[in-house]
Image (cartoon, helix red, strand yellow):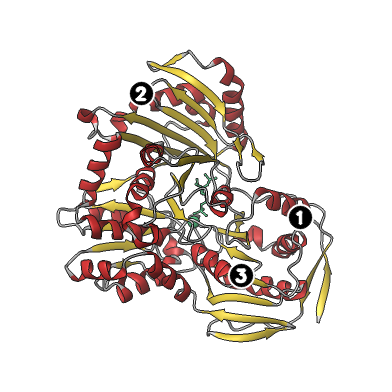
């Protein structure tokens, strides 16, 4: 029986960079989940009888919300739901299932790199039939609906058992509980030279993969250890836990410190990698060398043709605006276009669908390609492995050669977390007000060449997205970028992105903080960070 339940709107259900994210107790408010899910369905058309994919990163509250979403999907008229066993689907695996089975769309339950647990974070995101995050047109419609919603519809039925692979019925909707790993592993096998990777591991190649007690564990264990023959124990923290073991599943040098330290030891494995809560990001560390995500994107793009799936070359490269210009130099050399988009994977969808870009990346350790419509942590790791298998060089040697060919983009991101929202907005407003007067002025010895608030004009659908980050570009190619995070759940997070381009062969081996020192001080002077936020140092440097 379908129940229609009266409800009243919440005023804070605006999706951010990647879906709606709040603390679990916030999501547990009466009808909070139901309002948002109904608003998703109310913003879509033509899904009657079609398939909805549902899965999540296994964090606390995942199981409860999946049951609600299933019963609401049945009430809304979907014909079939595909759910990962145990409610598990990594973000890239969900994207693949949507595409492979021609689903109408999917609901992904994740707050990605944010911590999990009864008082930590949860999130809901809608992906469209191309497998990618809903574009702004749809997220805006969902938000508008959350402001006016008066009722939701739900099937009155007991919870389903999602722990066994099976086909179930929920009213007139069929529910297929699927193996969350199989389709994804098959896709990876079609893109990369698995026999060559197997031979590399058989030859003694050693790797450490930190799944951070999040969703990638089962995927990494199946692919790296079972299929490619990497030694047992290659995958660390491989069991997904609802609270990620109390850690932040954020693959950066702060939260993946353990892996970093292992990789800096003298007898370190050949290759180290980590992934985030929902499996869409990657951290790459070679023996004794951390590869910045921006450099990783450039290196992957420059060498992708070595993997069978990319042997035909790349159509184009896309990167988010704050990501360093390292990939731009690769695109230039390859004679292909480079697209610069706002932060968030949803902006890559049109470029990938139109065949304009093959590889995309963000400075936040997200890289991916046209194989799905999400960033994909393990994909990046496997492409790296494929390149290592072909080049037979160390990560350090490959990075060094790359810098010698293209120059080096020294890069760092400074995050000031949980700062007062009013202070954060004041800081950005003040910067915006000064943009017109900045060009020509000198800061910490650096001359400002241009300054703007980044706006994106989508070349495919003509849409415009304004206010996507303040850019201050200096003469010589250095820059600082300021923007506020759209994924946090308490206060505001200011992100300051700092980049210097260095082509002088004698200056390619500097410590990053030394290479960026003058820019860091220019950023402080320009944005008055300490006086406006009360912080004298960032919480996280990546
Ligand atoms: C952050 C990253 C962004 C990424 C987004 C979602 O957004 O900066 O590059 O796309 O997280 O990634 P923000 O607005 O906090 O800067 V994930 O792995 O959380 O789905
Ligand atoms: Co993620």
Q: Secondary structure at mark 1?
A: helix
Question: Between disc 3 and disc 2, whose residue precedes?
Answer: 3
> What SS does tag 2 mark?
helix
Q: Residues within 10 Å of mark 3 (few under 14, many from 20)?
A: some
Q: Which residue is mark 1?
A: 146
Res. 192 image quadrant: bottom left
Q: Which residue carries the number 2 mark?
A: 518
- Check contact, mark 1 vs mark 2: CB within 8 A: no
Where does the image place residue 32, in percent across and percent down from the top left?
A: 71, 61
Of marks 1 and 3, which one's residue comes earlier in the chain? 3
Left or right: 363 as drawn, with respect to 451: left
Q: Nearer the viewer, residue 515 or 387?
A: 387
Residue 13 visible in the current orientation: no
Q: Which circle, 1 or 3, is nearer the viewer?
A: 3
Q: Which residue is farthest left?
A: 266
For marks 1 and 2, the one nearer the N-term is 1
Residue 9 in view (yes/no): yes
Mark 3 highlights which residue?
Answer: 102
């Amino acid at each position: 029986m379908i129940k229609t339940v009266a409800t009243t709107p919440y005023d804070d259900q605006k999706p951010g960079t990647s879906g709606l994210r709040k603390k679990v107790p916030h999501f547990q408010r009466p009808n909070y989940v139901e309002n948002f899910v109904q608003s998703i369905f109310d913003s879509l058309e033509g899904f009657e009888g079609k398939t909805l994919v549902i899965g999540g990163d296994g964090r606390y509250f995942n199981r409860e919300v999946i049951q609600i979403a299933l019963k609401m999907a049945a009430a809304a008229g979907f014909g079939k739901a595909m759910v990962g066993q145990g409610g598990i689907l990594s973000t890239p695996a969900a994207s693949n299932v949507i595409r492979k089975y021609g689903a109408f769309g999917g609901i992904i339950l994740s707050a990605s790199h944010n911590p999990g647990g009864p008082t930590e974070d949860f999130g809901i995101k809608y992906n469209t039939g191309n497998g990618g995050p809903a574009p702004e047109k749809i997220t805006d419609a969902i938000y508008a609906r959350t402001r006016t919603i008066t009722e939701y519809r739900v099937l009155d039925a007991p919870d389903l058992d999602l722990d066994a692979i099976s086909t179930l019925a929920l009213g007139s909707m069929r529910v297929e509980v699927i193996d969350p790993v199989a389709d994804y592993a098959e896709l990876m096998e079609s893109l990369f030279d698995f026999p060559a990777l197997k031979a590399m591991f058989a030859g003694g190649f050693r790797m450490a993969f930190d799944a951070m007690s999040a969703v990638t564990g089962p995927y990494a264990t199946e692919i790296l250890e079972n299929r490619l023959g990497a030694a047992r124990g290659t995958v660390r923290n491989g069991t997904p836990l609802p609270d990620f073991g109390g850690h932040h599943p954020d693959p950066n040098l702060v939260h993946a410190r353990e892996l970093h330290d292992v990789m800096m030891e003298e007898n370190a494995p050949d290759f180290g990698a980590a992934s985030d809560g929902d499996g869409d990001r990657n951290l790459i560390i070679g023996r004794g060398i951390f590869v910045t995500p921006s450099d990783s994107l450039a290196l992957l793009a420059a060498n992708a043709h070595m993997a069978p799936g990319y042997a035909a070359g790349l159509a184009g490269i896309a990167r988010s605006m704050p990501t360093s210009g390292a990939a731009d130099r690769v695109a230039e050399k390859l004679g292909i276009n480079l697209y610069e988009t706002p932060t968030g994977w949803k902006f890559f969808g049109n470029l990938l669908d139109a065949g304009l870009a093959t590889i995309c990346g963000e400075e936040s350790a997200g890289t991916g390609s046209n194989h799905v419509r999400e960033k994909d942590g393990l994909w990046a790791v496997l492409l790296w492995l494929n390149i290592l298998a072909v080049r037979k060089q160390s990560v350090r040697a490959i990075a060094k050669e790359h810098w010698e060919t293209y120059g080096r983009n020294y890069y760092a991101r400074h995050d000031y977390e949980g700062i007062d929202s009013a202070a954060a907005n004041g800081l950005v407003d003040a910067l915006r007000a000064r943009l017109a007067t900045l060009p020509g002025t000198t800061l910490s010895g650096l001359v400002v060449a241009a300054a703007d608030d980044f706006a994106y004009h989508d070349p495919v659908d003509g849409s415009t997205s304004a206010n996507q980050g303040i850019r201050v570009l200096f003469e010589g190619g250095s820059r600082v970028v300021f923007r506020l995070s759209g994924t946090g759940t308490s206060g505001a997070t200011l992100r300051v992105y700092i980049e210097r381009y260095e082509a002088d062969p004698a200056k390619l081996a500097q410590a990053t903080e030394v290479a960026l020192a003058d820019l860091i001080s220019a950023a402080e002077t320009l944005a008055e960070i300490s006086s406006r936020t009360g912080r004298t140092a960032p919480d996280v440097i990546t």
